Amino acid sequence: MRDLKDGSGFTLADLAQATAISRSSWERYLNGKQFPPRHAVQALCRAVDEAEDELLTQWALADAAWSGRGHPTPAVSGSASPPGSDDGISGLDSPVREGPSAVQRVSRTRRVLLAASAVIDQRPTSTAVAVVLLCSAMVVPAAVSYASRTAASQSAARPPICQLRSCEGRNPRTTACEDPVTLASHTAADGTRLEIRLSPSCRAGWIRVSPTHSGFRVEITGPDAREQSVDETARPAGDEVTTTTMIAAPHPSHLRACYYPSLGSPGRECFDGGAASPK
């Protein structure tokens, strides 16, 4: 191959332009640093206008010698009896073939790596994009599966720490009763927003209030539980929501909320857990 190149007067850059094989690849092939693939031999013959049959024949012999396929695999000493021996054991007069030898496996790996190297030399950008896409295709499903398993294990690992009467008097913000639903809501005459909240897992309820002023009172009651209430005497208007402590709710629709707009004046607004019904 080197004689053909030298006789043609081509430089490595000329070969790279004529064959679409990189200059660095040709430098490795022609200097014996890397065994040339078959398509490189054919491309060289076409570039210098030479018949390829003879050179391909030489390439096939060189490939057999390079890969080790041109030499028989030696038998392991002591693994077989010589022909005609009288040891009384039949079927051991020739080596047993148990698949490809280590030399053949290495040669196949080498050919695969050489082919991959040629592809990378010819199309580095496309190869890089393909590698990125392949990595994404493997990583993204694994990440999604891991996140799903983690979320499931976390939700399963947080059971409620109280139920029914054991929740009474406790702050819903500091317990594991974190699955609340709103049973009923009511907007008072002064604009204060009230909601009866229920945790189905804890079977307990409470009132959440969005106040418009200070000096009010809210209380939640039920037929099977003690009244829970909260007084707010120093909360400025427009501050964050407040809640009562929890009350057992074996029958959520029986919960009743009452709002007292002023601690020093009579009058209240009440509604139950089935539907808002101001009184």
Image (spheres, helix red, strand yellow):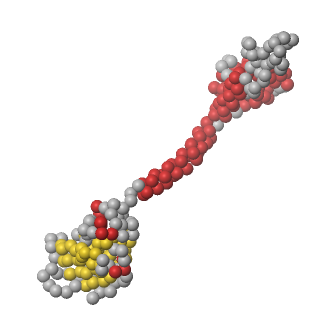
The tally of labels here is 0
- Kindly identify the residue that appears in the image at 38 percent across and 57 percent down: 158
Q: Give the x, y percent position of residue 7.
A: 76, 18
> Which residue extends farthest left?
264
Relative to 119, is 200 on the left or the right?
Answer: left
Q: Position of residue 100 (x, y in %)?
A: 74, 26
**Eyeballing the image, is 131 above or below 183?**
above
| Residue nearest the observer in this picture, 69 or 81 | 81
Horizontally, residue 104 falls left or right of residue 94, namely left
Can residue 129 be seen from the camera position used here? no
Residue 19 drawn above or below residue 207: above
Residue in the foreground of this view, choosing between 116 and 54 = 116
Above or below: residue 92 compared with residue 243: above
Is residue 152 placed above or below 104 in the rendered structure?
below
Quarter of the image that includes the C terminus? bottom left
Where does residue 217 sit, x and y in percent of width and height? 20, 77
> Residue 33 appears in which quarter of the rendering?
top right
Relative to residue 52, is residue 149 drawn left or right? left
- The answer to which of 87 and 155 lies nearer the viewer is 87
- For the point 66% across and 32% down, which residue is it? 116
Q: Picture coordinates of residue 206 (x, y %)? A: 30, 72
Q: Nearer the viewer, residue 68 or 173?
A: 173
Residue that protrudes farthest toward the bottom in the picture: 279
Q: Is residue 90 visible?
A: yes
Instruction: Name which quarter of the figure residue 203 lies in.
Output: bottom left
Residue drawn 16% across the image and 76% down it: 215
Residue that extends furthest to the front in the rendered view of this protein = 88
Name the residue located 54 percent from the left edge and 45 percent from the top edge: 139
What is the quadrant of the N terminus in the image? Answer: top right
